[in-house]
Image (cartoon, grey):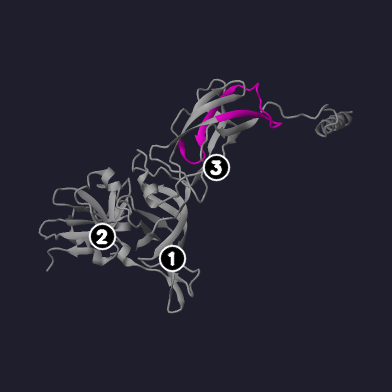
Amino acid sequence: MKNVLFLLIILSFLAVSCGETTGEKPVNRGLAGFLVEFAEDFDLGTPEHRIENPKDGIVTKINITALGYDKKPLSSYSGEVEISLLYGENGAVSRITMENGFAGDVEVKMRYCLDNDRVVVQEVKKREGETTYEPTGKMGVSPVFYTNVATISAIQGTVKGAKGNPSAFNNRNLTLKDREMVVIAIIEGGFYLHEVGAEEYSSVYMYTYSTPYVDDNVEESTSLPVGALIESANGSVFEFFGFTEMSFPTFHPVYEEKDGKRTLKVDTSLIPAPKDIGGILTDNDEMEKYEASLVKVENVSVDWFNAEDSSYVEYSQFPLKTSTGASIMAQTLYTAPLFNAVAEKPAEGNVTHHYNFTGILKQHTSARPSTWIIVPRDMNDIECLDCK
Protein backbone atom coordinates (compact mmCIF):
# COMPACT_ATOMS: atom_id res chain seq x y z
CA MET A 1 0.00 0.00 0.00
CA LYS A 2 2.86 2.38 0.87
CA ASN A 3 4.50 1.70 -2.48
CA VAL A 4 1.28 2.48 -4.34
CA LEU A 5 0.82 5.73 -2.44
CA PHE A 6 4.43 6.76 -3.15
CA LEU A 7 3.94 5.99 -6.85
CA LEU A 8 0.81 8.16 -6.97
CA ILE A 9 2.72 11.08 -5.42
CA ILE A 10 5.52 10.77 -7.97
CA LEU A 11 3.06 10.61 -10.87
CA SER A 12 1.24 13.68 -9.56
CA PHE A 13 4.55 15.58 -9.31
CA LEU A 14 5.52 14.62 -12.85
CA ALA A 15 2.13 15.70 -14.17
CA VAL A 16 2.49 19.14 -12.60
CA SER A 17 6.12 19.41 -13.76
CA CYS A 18 5.14 18.65 -17.33
CA GLY A 19 2.46 21.34 -17.26
CA GLU A 20 -0.52 18.99 -17.56
CA THR A 21 -2.47 20.71 -14.77
CA THR A 22 -1.04 24.26 -14.80
CA GLY A 23 -3.80 25.89 -16.82
CA GLU A 24 -2.83 28.88 -19.01
CA LYS A 25 0.82 29.36 -19.96
CA PRO A 26 2.23 32.17 -17.77
CA VAL A 27 3.13 35.45 -19.47
CA ASN A 28 5.47 38.27 -18.43
CA ARG A 29 3.62 41.28 -17.07
CA GLY A 30 4.62 44.69 -15.79
CA LEU A 31 7.95 46.47 -16.30
CA ALA A 32 10.44 45.00 -18.77
CA GLY A 33 12.91 47.90 -19.01
CA PHE A 34 13.33 51.53 -20.08
CA LEU A 35 13.70 53.55 -23.24
CA VAL A 36 16.40 56.17 -22.63
CA GLU A 37 16.55 59.06 -25.10
CA PHE A 38 18.34 62.38 -25.11
CA ALA A 39 15.69 65.05 -24.58
CA GLU A 40 17.30 67.75 -26.66
CA ASP A 41 19.31 68.05 -29.85
CA PHE A 42 22.36 66.34 -28.39
CA ASP A 43 25.29 65.64 -30.71
CA LEU A 44 26.31 62.00 -30.18
CA GLY A 45 29.48 62.41 -32.23
CA THR A 46 31.12 59.60 -34.20
CA PRO A 47 34.44 57.73 -33.91
CA GLU A 48 35.75 60.08 -36.60
CA HIS A 49 34.19 63.31 -35.28
CA ARG A 50 34.07 63.32 -31.49
CA ILE A 51 32.26 65.80 -29.25
CA GLU A 52 34.18 68.03 -26.86
CA ASN A 53 34.43 66.83 -23.28
CA PRO A 54 34.95 69.85 -20.98
CA LYS A 55 36.69 69.37 -17.66
CA ASP A 56 33.54 70.07 -15.64
CA GLY A 57 31.46 67.56 -17.63
CA ILE A 58 28.83 67.47 -20.38
CA VAL A 59 25.41 68.67 -19.20
CA THR A 60 22.35 67.45 -21.09
CA LYS A 61 18.83 66.09 -20.47
CA ILE A 62 17.21 62.73 -21.04
CA ASN A 63 13.68 61.33 -21.30
CA ILE A 64 12.92 58.00 -19.66
CA THR A 65 9.98 55.84 -20.72
CA ALA A 66 8.96 52.65 -18.91
CA LEU A 67 8.38 49.72 -21.31
CA GLY A 68 6.31 46.60 -20.93
CA TYR A 69 7.20 43.19 -22.33
CA ASP A 70 5.33 44.08 -25.51
CA LYS A 71 7.91 46.88 -25.98
CA LYS A 72 5.19 49.50 -25.63
CA PRO A 73 5.08 52.37 -23.10
CA LEU A 74 3.89 51.20 -19.69
CA SER A 75 1.88 54.17 -18.40
CA SER A 76 0.85 52.33 -15.23
CA TYR A 77 4.41 52.13 -13.96
CA SER A 78 5.59 54.09 -10.94
CA GLY A 79 8.87 53.48 -9.20
CA GLU A 80 12.37 54.70 -8.42
CA VAL A 81 15.27 54.60 -10.85
CA GLU A 82 18.96 55.42 -10.66
CA ILE A 83 20.76 57.27 -13.45
CA SER A 84 24.44 56.59 -14.07
CA LEU A 85 26.93 56.18 -16.90
CA LEU A 86 28.28 52.95 -18.28
CA TYR A 87 31.87 54.09 -17.66
CA GLY A 88 31.84 57.67 -16.41
CA GLU A 89 30.04 59.39 -13.56
CA ASN A 90 26.77 61.30 -13.33
CA GLY A 91 27.36 64.50 -11.38
CA ALA A 92 23.65 65.46 -11.28
CA VAL A 93 20.79 63.88 -9.28
CA SER A 94 21.26 60.14 -9.53
CA ARG A 95 17.91 58.82 -8.22
CA ILE A 96 14.43 59.97 -9.22
CA THR A 97 10.83 58.74 -8.89
CA MET A 98 8.96 57.99 -12.10
CA GLU A 99 5.20 58.50 -12.28
CA ASN A 100 2.82 57.29 -14.99
CA GLY A 101 5.64 55.50 -16.77
CA PHE A 102 7.57 58.61 -17.80
CA ALA A 103 10.18 61.12 -16.62
CA GLY A 104 11.12 63.99 -18.93
CA ASP A 105 13.92 66.55 -19.11
CA VAL A 106 16.00 64.80 -16.46
CA GLU A 107 19.37 66.56 -16.18
CA VAL A 108 22.50 64.45 -16.51
CA LYS A 109 26.01 65.79 -15.91
CA MET A 110 28.36 63.38 -17.63
CA ARG A 111 31.87 63.44 -16.11
CA TYR A 112 34.99 61.32 -16.62
CA CYS A 113 33.96 60.28 -20.13
CA LEU A 114 36.57 59.06 -22.59
CA ASP A 115 36.23 57.42 -26.00
CA ASN A 116 32.59 56.27 -25.85
CA ASP A 117 29.91 55.98 -23.19
CA ARG A 118 26.17 55.56 -22.53
CA VAL A 119 23.64 56.80 -19.96
CA VAL A 120 22.26 53.90 -17.90
CA VAL A 121 18.87 53.86 -16.14
CA GLN A 122 17.97 51.03 -13.79
CA GLU A 123 15.10 50.36 -11.42
CA VAL A 124 15.96 50.19 -7.72
CA LYS A 125 13.96 49.10 -4.70
CA LYS A 126 14.38 48.84 -0.96
CA ARG A 127 14.03 45.43 0.61
CA GLU A 128 11.58 45.22 3.49
CA GLY A 129 13.22 46.60 6.61
CA GLU A 130 16.29 47.86 4.70
CA THR A 131 17.45 51.43 4.13
CA THR A 132 19.60 50.95 1.02
CA TYR A 133 18.44 50.58 -2.57
CA GLU A 134 19.26 47.57 -4.72
CA PRO A 135 18.85 47.17 -8.48
CA THR A 136 16.08 44.87 -9.66
CA GLY A 137 17.68 44.04 -13.00
CA LYS A 138 15.23 46.14 -15.03
CA MET A 139 17.23 48.72 -17.00
CA GLY A 140 17.78 50.66 -20.23
CA VAL A 141 20.66 52.48 -21.93
CA SER A 142 20.92 55.53 -24.15
CA PRO A 143 22.47 55.58 -27.62
CA VAL A 144 26.28 55.56 -27.50
CA PHE A 145 28.03 58.93 -27.64
CA TYR A 146 31.66 59.56 -28.56
CA THR A 147 33.92 61.95 -26.63
CA ASN A 148 37.65 62.66 -26.65
CA VAL A 149 39.95 59.68 -27.15
CA ALA A 150 42.06 58.53 -24.23
CA THR A 151 45.48 60.10 -23.72
CA ILE A 152 48.13 59.61 -21.06
CA SER A 153 47.60 63.14 -19.74
CA ALA A 154 43.83 62.54 -19.47
CA ILE A 155 44.24 59.23 -17.61
CA GLN A 156 46.88 60.58 -15.22
CA GLY A 157 45.52 64.11 -14.89
CA THR A 158 41.88 63.31 -14.13
CA VAL A 159 42.11 62.12 -10.54
CA LYS A 160 39.85 61.62 -7.53
CA GLY A 161 40.58 62.73 -3.99
CA ALA A 162 41.36 59.34 -2.44
CA LYS A 163 44.75 58.40 -1.01
CA GLY A 164 47.29 58.26 -3.79
CA ASN A 165 45.13 60.39 -6.10
CA PRO A 166 43.84 57.46 -8.20
CA SER A 167 42.93 57.92 -11.85
CA ALA A 168 39.25 58.62 -12.48
CA PHE A 169 39.42 55.86 -15.10
CA ASN A 170 40.57 53.12 -12.72
CA ASN A 171 39.43 49.63 -13.84
CA ARG A 172 38.55 50.80 -17.34
CA ASN A 173 40.00 49.38 -20.56
CA LEU A 174 41.16 52.23 -22.82
CA THR A 175 43.11 52.82 -26.01
CA LEU A 176 45.75 55.56 -26.11
CA LYS A 177 46.07 57.20 -29.53
CA ASP A 178 46.13 60.45 -31.49
CA ARG A 179 49.20 61.65 -29.60
CA GLU A 180 52.91 61.23 -30.29
CA MET A 181 54.23 58.81 -27.63
CA VAL A 182 57.77 57.64 -26.88
CA VAL A 183 59.23 54.92 -24.63
CA ILE A 184 61.35 56.61 -21.92
CA ALA A 185 62.40 53.57 -19.85
CA ILE A 186 62.06 49.80 -19.68
CA ILE A 187 62.08 48.62 -16.07
CA GLU A 188 60.56 45.79 -14.01
CA GLY A 189 58.63 43.84 -16.58
CA GLY A 190 57.19 46.75 -18.48
CA PHE A 191 57.89 50.11 -20.02
CA TYR A 192 57.20 53.76 -19.33
CA LEU A 193 55.39 55.67 -22.05
CA HIS A 194 55.54 59.46 -22.40
CA GLU A 195 53.14 61.77 -24.23
CA VAL A 196 55.32 64.09 -26.26
CA GLY A 197 54.56 67.76 -25.60
CA ALA A 198 52.76 67.21 -22.28
CA GLU A 199 54.65 68.72 -19.33
CA GLU A 200 52.46 67.40 -16.49
CA TYR A 201 50.71 64.04 -16.05
CA SER A 202 52.67 63.05 -19.14
CA SER A 203 53.78 59.46 -18.51
CA VAL A 204 52.31 56.09 -17.52
CA TYR A 205 53.63 52.63 -16.69
CA MET A 206 52.67 49.89 -19.17
CA TYR A 207 52.84 46.67 -17.15
CA THR A 208 53.62 43.87 -19.62
CA TYR A 209 54.67 41.42 -16.84
CA SER A 210 57.88 40.64 -18.77
CA THR A 211 60.36 42.33 -21.07
CA PRO A 212 58.27 43.93 -23.83
CA TYR A 213 58.95 42.47 -27.27
CA VAL A 214 57.98 43.46 -30.78
CA ASP A 215 57.38 40.45 -33.01
CA ASP A 216 55.02 41.72 -35.70
CA ASN A 217 55.77 43.57 -38.93
CA VAL A 218 59.54 43.23 -38.50
CA GLU A 219 61.89 40.61 -39.86
CA GLU A 220 62.79 39.19 -36.44
CA SER A 221 61.51 39.49 -32.88
CA THR A 222 63.24 42.22 -30.89
CA SER A 223 62.86 43.78 -27.47
CA LEU A 224 61.23 47.18 -27.40
CA PRO A 225 63.99 49.81 -27.25
CA VAL A 226 64.07 53.06 -25.30
CA GLY A 227 63.15 55.90 -27.66
CA ALA A 228 60.74 53.77 -29.70
CA LEU A 229 57.71 55.68 -30.93
CA ILE A 230 54.31 54.15 -30.16
CA GLU A 231 51.34 54.80 -32.42
CA SER A 232 48.67 53.37 -30.09
CA ALA A 233 48.39 51.23 -26.97
CA ASN A 234 45.52 49.48 -25.23
CA GLY A 235 45.28 48.28 -21.64
CA SER A 236 43.27 48.30 -18.43
CA VAL A 237 43.88 51.19 -16.04
CA PHE A 238 44.76 49.83 -12.60
CA GLU A 239 45.86 51.46 -9.35
CA PHE A 240 48.60 49.56 -7.53
CA PHE A 241 48.96 51.17 -4.09
CA GLY A 242 48.45 54.62 -5.63
CA PHE A 243 50.60 53.99 -8.72
CA THR A 244 48.66 54.17 -11.98
CA GLU A 245 49.39 51.34 -14.42
CA MET A 246 47.96 50.03 -17.66
CA SER A 247 47.97 46.24 -17.27
CA PHE A 248 48.37 43.57 -19.96
CA PRO A 249 48.81 46.20 -22.67
CA THR A 250 48.96 45.68 -26.39
CA PHE A 251 50.84 48.29 -28.36
CA HIS A 252 51.58 49.24 -31.94
CA PRO A 253 54.95 50.88 -32.62
CA VAL A 254 55.67 53.29 -35.43
CA TYR A 255 57.69 51.76 -38.30
CA GLU A 256 59.91 53.18 -40.99
CA GLU A 257 61.81 51.90 -44.01
CA LYS A 258 65.60 51.81 -43.65
CA ASP A 259 67.90 50.28 -46.26
CA GLY A 260 64.96 48.47 -47.75
CA LYS A 261 63.94 46.94 -44.41
CA ARG A 262 60.99 47.68 -42.17
CA THR A 263 62.30 48.76 -38.75
CA LEU A 264 61.08 50.37 -35.56
CA LYS A 265 61.20 54.14 -35.54
CA VAL A 266 63.38 55.32 -32.65
CA ASP A 267 63.94 58.95 -31.66
CA THR A 268 65.64 59.41 -28.28
CA SER A 269 65.60 63.20 -28.76
CA LEU A 270 61.89 63.08 -27.85
CA ILE A 271 62.69 61.79 -24.34
CA PRO A 272 62.18 64.82 -22.06
CA ALA A 273 64.81 66.18 -19.72
CA PRO A 274 64.41 65.00 -16.12
CA LYS A 275 62.17 67.19 -13.96
CA ASP A 276 63.86 68.48 -10.81
CA ILE A 277 61.46 67.57 -7.97
CA GLY A 278 63.68 68.52 -5.04
CA GLY A 279 61.48 71.47 -4.12
CA ILE A 280 58.14 69.62 -4.17
CA LEU A 281 58.93 66.37 -2.30
CA THR A 282 56.50 67.24 0.52
CA ASP A 283 53.66 68.25 -1.83
CA ASN A 284 51.83 65.11 -2.92
CA ASP A 285 49.55 66.91 -5.37
CA GLU A 286 52.53 68.43 -7.17
CA MET A 287 54.43 65.12 -7.09
CA GLU A 288 51.42 63.39 -8.64
CA LYS A 289 51.91 65.46 -11.80
CA TYR A 290 55.21 63.66 -12.46
CA GLU A 291 54.25 60.10 -11.54
CA ALA A 292 55.89 57.62 -13.97
CA SER A 293 57.93 60.49 -15.46
CA LEU A 294 61.67 61.00 -15.67
CA VAL A 295 62.76 63.08 -12.65
CA LYS A 296 65.83 63.98 -10.62
CA VAL A 297 66.77 64.95 -7.06
CA GLU A 298 70.04 66.76 -6.50
CA ASN A 299 72.52 66.87 -3.61
CA VAL A 300 70.95 64.02 -1.60
CA SER A 301 72.53 61.53 0.75
CA VAL A 302 71.48 58.09 1.94
CA ASP A 303 69.50 58.38 5.19
CA TRP A 304 69.64 55.82 7.98
CA PHE A 305 67.62 52.62 7.41
CA ASN A 306 67.46 49.08 8.73
CA ALA A 307 69.37 46.88 6.28
CA GLU A 308 67.46 43.84 7.55
CA ASP A 309 64.09 45.35 6.72
CA SER A 310 62.23 43.47 3.98
CA SER A 311 61.97 46.57 1.80
CA TYR A 312 65.75 46.64 1.49
CA VAL A 313 66.39 42.89 1.51
CA GLU A 314 63.83 42.18 -1.22
CA TYR A 315 63.90 45.37 -3.31
CA SER A 316 67.06 47.31 -2.33
CA GLN A 317 64.78 50.14 -1.27
CA PHE A 318 66.27 52.84 0.99
CA PRO A 319 65.65 56.52 1.87
CA LEU A 320 67.40 59.55 0.45
CA LYS A 321 67.52 62.83 2.36
CA THR A 322 67.82 66.32 0.90
CA SER A 323 69.70 69.23 2.47
CA THR A 324 66.34 70.57 3.71
CA GLY A 325 65.42 67.29 5.42
CA ALA A 326 62.83 66.10 2.89
CA SER A 327 62.80 62.41 2.00
CA ILE A 328 62.29 60.22 -1.04
CA MET A 329 62.86 56.49 -1.39
CA ALA A 330 65.24 54.99 -3.96
CA GLN A 331 65.07 51.48 -5.43
CA THR A 332 68.11 50.01 -7.14
CA LEU A 333 67.73 46.20 -7.11
CA TYR A 334 67.02 45.61 -10.80
CA THR A 335 68.59 48.63 -12.45
CA ALA A 336 71.58 49.74 -10.35
CA PRO A 337 72.51 46.71 -8.18
CA LEU A 338 76.14 47.84 -7.76
CA PHE A 339 75.12 50.82 -5.65
CA ASN A 340 75.95 49.91 -2.03
CA ALA A 341 73.42 51.81 0.08
CA VAL A 342 74.50 50.08 3.31
CA ALA A 343 77.98 51.52 2.98
CA GLU A 344 76.48 54.98 2.44
CA LYS A 345 74.08 55.17 5.36
CA PRO A 346 75.17 57.43 8.20
CA ALA A 347 76.98 55.69 11.04
CA GLU A 348 79.69 56.58 13.50
CA GLY A 349 83.04 57.01 11.78
CA ASN A 350 82.02 56.69 8.11
CA VAL A 351 81.84 59.45 5.55
CA THR A 352 78.63 59.65 3.52
CA HIS A 353 78.58 61.05 0.03
CA HIS A 354 76.20 63.32 -1.80
CA TYR A 355 74.56 62.37 -5.06
CA ASN A 356 72.35 63.47 -7.87
CA PHE A 357 69.77 60.75 -8.51
CA THR A 358 67.87 60.54 -11.81
CA GLY A 359 65.18 58.00 -12.62
CA ILE A 360 61.52 57.15 -12.96
CA LEU A 361 59.15 58.42 -10.25
CA LYS A 362 56.93 55.74 -8.70
CA GLN A 363 54.43 55.83 -5.86
CA HIS A 364 53.57 53.24 -3.24
CA THR A 365 51.13 54.46 -0.61
CA SER A 366 52.42 52.05 2.05
CA ALA A 367 56.11 53.00 1.68
CA ARG A 368 57.85 54.85 4.51
CA PRO A 369 59.18 57.43 5.21
CA SER A 370 58.08 58.65 1.78
CA THR A 371 55.41 57.20 -0.49
CA TRP A 372 57.45 58.35 -3.49
CA ILE A 373 60.23 56.24 -5.00
CA ILE A 374 62.86 57.12 -7.59
CA VAL A 375 64.09 54.20 -9.72
CA PRO A 376 67.35 54.84 -11.63
CA ARG A 377 67.39 53.44 -15.17
CA ASP A 378 70.99 52.26 -14.67
CA MET A 379 74.16 53.20 -12.79
CA ASN A 380 74.65 56.24 -15.03
CA ASP A 381 71.63 57.80 -13.31
CA ILE A 382 73.54 57.96 -10.00
CA GLU A 383 76.13 60.75 -9.93
CA CYS A 384 78.41 61.10 -6.93
CA LEU A 385 79.21 64.75 -6.21
CA ASP A 386 82.10 64.30 -3.76
CA CYS A 387 83.57 60.88 -4.47
CA LYS A 388 87.30 60.78 -5.16
Task: Estimate the x, y position of residue 274 in percent, counting from the top left.
Answer: 25, 58
Q: Quadrant of residue 2?
A: top right
Highlighted magenta segment, given as a residue range: 63-89
Instruction: Residue under label 3, please give it.
Output: 144
Is residue 39 rendered to the left or right of residue 282?
A: right
Asked if one can make out residue 304 in the rendered structure from this viewpoint, the answer is no
What separation in Å lies between label 1 and label 2 (alpha carbons)? 22 Å
Q: Is residue 209 above or below residue 105?
A: below
Of helix, strand and loop, which one carries label 1? loop
- Which of the marked residues, 1 or 2, is nearer the chain's N terminus? 1
Q: Quadrant of the N terminus?
A: top right
Task: Estimate the x, y position of residue 174 in percent, counting from the top left.
Answer: 47, 50
Name which residue type carries label 1: Val
Q: Is residue 67 magenta?
A: yes
- 167 or 308: which is nearer to us? 167
Of helix, strand and loop, which one carries label 3? loop
- 299 or 33: which is nearer to us? 33
What separation in Å lies between label 1 and label 3 (alpha carbons)? 31 Å
Quick one: label 2, few (<14), some, or many (20+) residues within 10 Å? few
Of helix, strand and loop, which one carries label 2? loop
Q: Say whether marks 1 and 3 touch (CB < 8 Å).
A: no
Asked if one can make out residue 55 in the rendered structure from this viewpoint, the answer is yes
Q: Quadrant of the C terminus?
A: bottom left
- Which of the marked residues, 1 or 3, is nearer the chain's N terminus? 3
Task: Estimate the x, y position of residue 352 in percent, counting from the top left.
Answer: 13, 59
Q: Is residue 146 magenta?
A: no
Name which residue type carries label 3: Val
Name which residue type carries label 2: Ala
Instruction: Residue under label 1, please give it.
Output: 254
Q: Residue at x 39, y 59 (%)?
A: 180
Task: Estimate the x, y position of residue 250 in percent, counting from the top left.
Answer: 48, 59
Instruction: Residue under label 2, please give it.
Output: 273
